[in-house]
Amino acid sequence: MVELKIGSDFFELSEDQLRKAIEEGLIEGHDLVRSKEYTESKWLLISEVEPFRTWIVRSSPTEVDYADMPPAKRALIERQKQIERDLEERGVSLYCPNCGSDKNTIPSAIYTGKFYCKKCARYYEMEVSMESNDVKVETKYKSVGGWLLLFCLSLTIFSPLLTIFYFVSAYNELSPGFNQFPGLLTLCIIDGMLSIGLMIFSIYAGIVLWKIKPGAIKIAKKYLLVFLGYSILAIFLPFTAGLPSQANESIIIEGAKNAIRSFIYFGIWYSYLNMSKRVKATYETLEVKS
């Protein structure tokens, strides 16, 4: 059996009943589903769960028998049709910014401003005023582009390459002093391990952002916080290498330069993730507590 949640109403269906309901257009991709077999008893969006996601993508709704429909779902269908009529009167064309289809897009009857594309099984948002003739369509931000794309490139390509470059340069510069100051070798090993871990985290954060995965923004923010922590630690690491006191001034100056660059990088991108319209439009999804 599969549990289905539509708004505040709960239903228990067999898989055959669920498939039939999807084919008849009674269930939307943002409806919640829970089962032991497919969701490990957690509430998830039905569009995120196989095989239900495939059923939604491939199904083409047929005529609906309103007499057999649960009252709660009937009200949602009527609300959905009313939204479609209002948008049509205002001349708003519903097209999916992800696949470009204008024949498979339906408005959500529950979540204002959300629209679902049955072809690519993905949501996008439109800021629509249903109380006036003013309709504002905000779909251009619903993608990985602009500064967001630059951030993804920074995480997956630029930052890892710079990490490798700086580490190799530092190793070549410090290696002649390994015999005289054994602490330098230890410092390079520790810094190398931290750098590799940070580089892997950076690539992972960039990939989940690029693929618009659930929780991508939280992961990216965690990376930036870890990056900031590493940058602070890197200021003090050179003092553990046992270098003469005459080198402290150079260490402090170089550490300050690196710290300033890191703080600027952190400040810019952390603020961007919190304030960007594109980030909000692309990653804002329904959070469901099981």
Image (cartoon, rainbow, N blue to C red):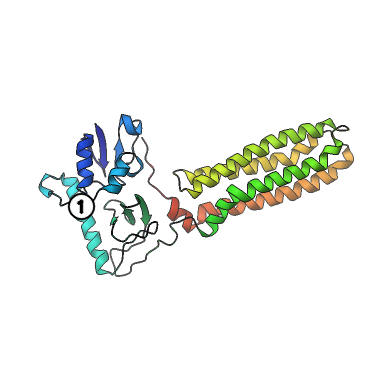
Q: Which residue is mark 1?
A: 77
- Identified at 20% across, 52% down, the residue is 77
15, 126: nearer the viewer: 15
One can see residue 181 in this view: yes
Q: Residue furthest front?
A: 58
Question: How many numbered tags mark residues here?
Answer: 1
Kind of residue at badge 1: Ile
One can see residue 266 in this view: no
- Identified at 28% across, 46% down, the residue is 56
Quick one: quadrant of the N terminus? top left
- Identified at 10% across, 47% down, the residue is 67
| 191 vs 30: above or below | above
55, 43: nearer the viewer: 55
As helix, strand or loop, the secondary structure at mark 1 comes to helix
Q: Position of residue 18 (x, y in %)?
A: 22, 39
Q: Position of residue 24 (x, y in %)?
A: 19, 47
Q: Position of residue 188 (x, y in %)?
A: 76, 36
Residue 187 in the figure: left or right of residue 15: right
Quick one: quadrant of the C terminus? top left
